[in-house]
Image: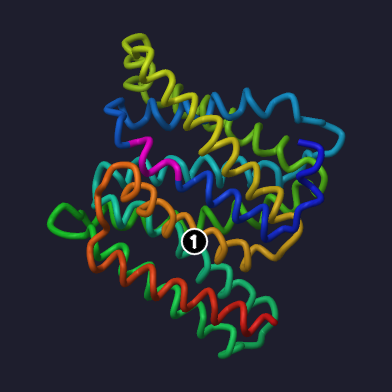
Amino acid sequence: MPHLPALSGRTLVLLGALCWSLNSPLVKYLTLDSFLICALRSLIAGLVLLPALRPREIAWNRYLAAYALAYCALCLSVITSLSLTSPAIAIGMQYTATIWLFLLYWIQSRAFNRRAFLPVLVIMAGVLCFMLSGGSGDSHPLGNLIALTEGIFFAGMSLASQKATRTNALGITALGNLVTALVVFALFPSARAALPAMDGREWLLMVLLGVVQVAGGYGFYNLGVQKIPAREASVLALWEMILGPLWVALFLHQIPGPMVLAGFAVILCGMLLNAKMRA
């Protein structure tokens, strides 16, 4: 991957969102235990990226620990909320990171920028459309509360990544995934118990998820967030929400509903508004 650092930060984050979006069609074919999926794809991603680890280029400090903990907590909060509330809420809430990052910037700068906040409001309205498209009676207050933490963990992961390294983003991605795999396999016996029963087709899908969706997605994202502000990266990451349903429509012939299409339009408007104000 010698030429990747030459790409712009925005391009790298967009490539990460593209890799994440492939989860939507692939996971439709899996009926494995959710904690096994979480642990195994992280283990595969960590092992794939491990050769890129260069210990001298990583700051072995509290920011690295914060990155690993935030990433692990993000993975666990998504998996746990998926079992308690609607999938649209469980997936969509991680993108509230844009709001948390804006609020943090506001506190640090002590200046509220209404022009900068307008695109954030528009984007969050689009995310809300996605969440409402799948939210119904299957939502649960506890699941919603857990899902609410996802945006905080995503924001924390993005900020800590910038502090832990500037030259070995793939290395910290490997470490974060190995820590996550270790924690999930250790804490959840169902993940270990389901492992021996996997067949060849399930292994193939898990390898694709581990290599493409996790190693590729978070690898590209962490490379990109070294070059651009975390607030901007969190906005570009929203392309996952747009591309995921698109792949499902193209390959599985499941057409998005009106609320999802409305979410497309509103999020794109927010992104265009954000780009215009940044120019």
How many other residues sit within 10 Å of disc 1, few (<14), some (14-19) or many (≥20)? many
Q: Residue furthest top?
A: 196
Is the C terminus in the top left, top right, bottom left or bottom right quadrant?
bottom right
User: Magenta segment: does it hold 84?
Assistant: no
Rendered image quadrant of residue 214: top right
Residue 278 in percent (x, y) is at 67, 80
Residue nearest the observer in this picture, 165 or 201: 201
49 is higher (above) or lower (below) than 78: above
State the residue position of label 1. Answer: 238
**Which residue shows up at 65% across the image and 63% down it?**
230
Q: Where is residue 236 drawn, in percent x and y?
A: 57, 63
At horizontal 16% and vertical 59% (from top left) the residue drawn is 136
Where's residue 74, x and y in %?
48, 46
Q: Which residues are magenta?
A: 22-27
Q: Amino acid at mark 1?
A: Leu
Height in image: 96 above or below 183?
below
Q: Secondary structure at mark 1?
A: loop
Query: Image point 82% across, 31% down: which residue?
Result: 55
Residue closest to the far bottom: 114
